[in-house]
Image (cartoon, rainbow, N blue to C red):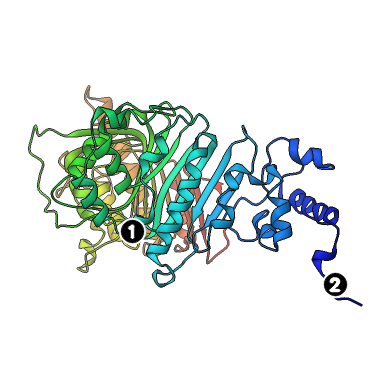
């Protein structure tokens, strides 16, 4: 008896197998006939992680040529097109034309490499270029386009994504996850600027649905250099744009400097819902100095501003150039925070894994936390995974302690905090937290009494109403729990250490 072979099965059987795989891969819907497959509504995939090699239809197309030939003729399969640039993209470069217009496309181009030695930079650049060339004629159909490759120099130039009106484009992301190596591209771009009106007219000025734009620092600066007026005039998602800039090292002279970046970024702030700056640094040492009174500065104001893994020199110079206002929420993650000489009034402040360069005595630790806390006057403070959050810092944070170091406003700390959330901080004690809460509430009561006899007030003082302590944190003692019950009326306490089970939350 001849050996079994998949190729011996009739084509009709193969089609039924692939139809069944397709049905299992998408959200529930009726697929009974060939007509259903070709004319059903746009599909929604069950697997949200588009980067898995086991996802249909790519897993099926890679089995054999017969399955490849069949599945490439099912248009509904190809509204999400994914390339791992560690693999040859050639078999799928035509995938953009395998689906039916006007169905929109989601495009993901990424590298699955986890180490530098796994990536050939020139090969990656060639493959990204081939994919980009195949994609460009179909950009007007795209709903989202995501590039996340190993090397920043492999990324396509950003202007090509804005040459045509793209009415459905909601998300564009050009990012790298391993190496920032744009020095040669910076030199080439600076040596060959094209800022004439003729060049400017090639870019569309209206992207009504675009609400998520993520660019490397080089991509943003490239647009600023070659199309400066376009950055100011382009319409993106009304005033609801979430802008992220990442992965760049600014130089101290020429065009690709932090002051130039700030100049063009500030032109967009009126359209921003949020601004995220991550993995940004300086190629030079920045010496902090007090800003001259009356010095011309830019303004960036939006509901949410996030800093992640940016160097202290970047933050110091950034704040010296810009009046920063996060109206709703401001966050710092994986940062060493320098002295900040601006009042920060965002309602929420999130501090996560804040670095502390001090190795001195306990009263000198927590410099980064202090630098931001002493100029912040919001009401909701969230501290996560900060080793320097200890009893010494809690003692310093008490509202009766006047700032004597960096705060140009001479304000009391924490007077407006109504909610404190601490997660995965192991170096404070239950007693230290209790003493802080007690001091905060007593200060609020005393100042309220003083204000009742005066027409002047230093500002709003709010008794702490919510205290949440979770994760890897010290256990609360019964004595302190009893104290909260007796002395802190109106406080909603949630204290749940991973080391002990406590019935929470409770109203005390």
**Of residues 423 and 13, which is closer to you in this image?**
13
Q: Position of residue 455 (x, y in %)?
A: 22, 22
Mark 2: few, some, or many residues within 10 Å (few <14, many ≥20)?
A: few
Which one is nearer the viewer's eye here, 281 or 480?
Answer: 281
**Mark 1 closeness class: few <14, some 14–19, many ≥20 residues within 10 Å:** many
Residue 4 position (above or below residue 13): below
Q: Residue at x 56, y 47 (%)?
A: 506
Label 1 belongs to which residue?
389
Q: How far from the left and from the top, in percent, is residue 198?
A: 28, 28
Which mark is first along the chain, 1 or 2? 2
- Say whether residue 63 is visible: yes
Residue at left 20%, top 39%?
A: 342
Numbered label attached to residue 4: 2
Query: Does residue 354 sit above or below 298 in this rendering?
Result: below
Q: Kindly identify the residue that appears in the image at 79 percent across and 38 percent down.
A: 36
SS under mark 1: loop
Q: Is residue 24 left or right of residue 506?
A: right
Choose between 146 and 400: the one closer to the eye. Answer: 146
Task: Evaluate whether residue 460 shows in this view.
Answer: no
């Amino acid at each position: 008896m001849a050996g079994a072979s998949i190729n011996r099965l009739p084509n009709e059987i193969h089609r039924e197998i692939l139809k069944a795989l397709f049905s299992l891969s998408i959200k529930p819907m009726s697929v009974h006939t060939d007509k259903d497959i070709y004319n059903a509504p746009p599909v929604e995939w069950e697997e949200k992680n588009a980067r898995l090699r086991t996802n249909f239809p790519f897993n099926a197309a890679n089995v054999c040529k017969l399955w490849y030939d069949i599945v490439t003729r099912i248009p509904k399969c190809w509204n999400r097109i994914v390339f791992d640039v560690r693999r040859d993209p050639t078999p799928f470069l035509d995938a953009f034309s395998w689906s039916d217009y006007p169905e929109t496309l989601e495009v993901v181009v990424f590298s699955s490499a986890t180490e530098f030695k796994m990536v050939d930079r020139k090969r990656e650049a060639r493959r990204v270029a081939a994919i980009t060339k195949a994609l460009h004629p179909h950009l007007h159909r795209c709903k989202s386009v995501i590039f996340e490759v190993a090397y920043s120099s492999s990324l396509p130039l950003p202007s090509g994504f804005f040459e045509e009106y793209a009415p459905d484009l909601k998300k564009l992301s050009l990012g790298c996850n391993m190496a920032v190596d744009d020095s040669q591209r910076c030199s080439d771009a600076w040596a060959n600027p094209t800022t004439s009106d003729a060049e400017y007219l090639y870019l569309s000025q209206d992207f009504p649905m675009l609400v998520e734009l993520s660019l490397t620092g080089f991509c943003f600066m490239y647009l600023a250099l070659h199309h400066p007026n376009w950055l100011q005039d382009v319409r993106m998602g009304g005033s609801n744009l979430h802008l992220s800039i990442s992965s760049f090292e600014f130089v101290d002279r020429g065009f690709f400097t932090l002051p130039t970046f700030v100049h063009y970024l500030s032109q967009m702030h009126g359209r921003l819902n949020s601004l995220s700056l991550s993995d940004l640094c300086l190629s030079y040492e920045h010496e902090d100095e007090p800003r001259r009174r009356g010095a011309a500065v830019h303004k960036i104001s939006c509901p949410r501003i996030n800093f992640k893994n940016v160097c202290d020199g970047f933050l110091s110079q950034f704040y010296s150039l810009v009046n920063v206002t996060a109206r709703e929420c401001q966050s710092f993650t994986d940062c060493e925070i320098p002295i900040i000489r601006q009042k920060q009034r965002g309602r929420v402040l999130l501090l996560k894994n804040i670095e502390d360069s001090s190795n001195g005595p306990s009263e000198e630790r927590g410099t980064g936390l202090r630098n931001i806390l002493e100029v912040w006057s919001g009401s909701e403070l969230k501290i996560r995974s900060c080793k320097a959050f200890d009893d010494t810092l809690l003692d310093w944070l008490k509202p009766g302690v006047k700032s004597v170091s960096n705060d140009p406003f001479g304000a009391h700390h924490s007077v407006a905090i109504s909610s404190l959330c601490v997660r995965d901080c192991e170096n404070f004690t239950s007693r230290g937290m209790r003493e802080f809460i007690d001091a905060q509430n007593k200060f609020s009561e005393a100042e309220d009494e003083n204000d009742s006899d005066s027409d002047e007030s230093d500002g709003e003082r709010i008794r702490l109403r919510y205290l949440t302590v979770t994760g890897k944190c010290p256990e609360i003692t019964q004595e302190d729990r009893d104290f909260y019950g007796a002395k802190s009326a109106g406080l909603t306490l949630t204290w749940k250490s991973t080391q002990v089970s406590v019935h929470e939350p409770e109203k005390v």
